[in-house]
Amino acid sequence: MTKNPLVVSGPYTHGNLAIFLFHGSDEIDGGGYISLTEAFEKKHVLVHETGTVGQLEVENLSETFDIFIQAGDVLKGGRQDRIVAIDFIIPARSGRIPIPAFCVEMGRWHKRGFEDAAKFTSSTHSVHAKSIRLAAKRASDQNQVWHSVAVSQEELGSALKKSVHAAASPTSYQLSVEDSALEKKKREYDETLRGIGKDRSDVIGYAFYVNGERNSADIYGSTKLFHKLWKKLLDVAILEAISGQNGNVTLPDKGNLEEWLKEAGNVQRSDTKKAAPRTRLETKSYPGGVVFETFDEAVGDQAVLHTNVISK
């Protein structure tokens, strides 16, 4: 968790979704990072299909920017759509670096439409369901990921009262969240909540509740990095809210959030692993959930680049 004290604002609400913003000072200069979405848009990145479901290769073509890839980022294309399994920093002029991944599309192992089977073309979404995120980040279990994707598709379909399975590939998570009826439903939330962090130079994270229940929190070492990721972060919260629509609208208070952060922040034991060339990941479990912390070792051993708390 961040060392600097956090100020909380909110909740900002729409329907069954409540969002709190975290305000604080930077611990890391975020100006040198770009998101995976931005890297694709600026043609700074190549993501190569390897022919192995659990591994891809990523290449940063930028001369100056490091790419921050967040666990759960969806990669569209290749032989089947994937998600990145862990947070990962890809340095400028990196060459091809292996990166762990999970499949979020069963069955396909060939070119889809006009896409390139050897490469991935975009990353516009991150998986929203807690079950998918925990299956990838905590359990590292492909079968759990597939099962959770299928459940999330059914939940979205139930909320919309229509199937979100795309004809081009019914099992594709990415194609499901591109459904036109779902996009229309998302706009109802987006129009209310998109601007809550706009022009606020001190916002470093957010937490959200669905139906009054704790879901997830993300805190960054830099406000610039948060703003670069905000569109995907909000999309995750909105999709969780749509999936969880049950007619109950309960608003949480700041006291509940502060208690949540205290519980997550007091965990001491952790599992540590490194991902070459410079990413360190620490995972801590507590009775109410899991805390994932990401460090960029080029910055220092103690500065946390990203903290993700997922409530069970």
Image: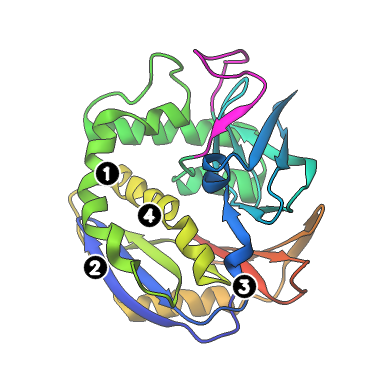
Of the two numbered discs 1 and 3 on the same chain, state the one appearing first in sequence. Answer: 3
Please, what is the three-letter code of the amino acid marked with disc 3?
Asp
Where residue 110 sits, quadrant-wise, is top right
Q: Percent x, y for residue 278?
A: 79, 59
Q: CA distance from mark 4 to mark 2?
A: 18 Å
Q: Quadrant of residue 28?
A: bottom right
Residue 165: image x %, image y %?
37, 22
Nearest the camera: 297 or 248? 297
Please report whichever mark, 4 or 2, sits nearer to the chain's N-terminal start.
Answer: 4
Location of residue 120 in the rendering, given as x and y in whole percent from the top left corner: 60, 29
Left or right: where 91 falls relative to 139: right
What is the x, y in percent for residue 128?
44, 46
Residue 29: give its label: 3
Give how far apart the Cα atoms at labels 4 and 3 are. 23 Å
Nearer to us: label 1 or label 3:
3
For label 4, count other residues whose C-alpha is less than 10 Å away and answer few (under 14), some (14-19) or many (20+).
some
Where are the magenta residues, as a range? Answer: 105-123
Asked if the stretch drawn in magenta spans residue 117, the answer is yes
Q: Earlier in the sequence, mark 2 or mark 1?
A: 1
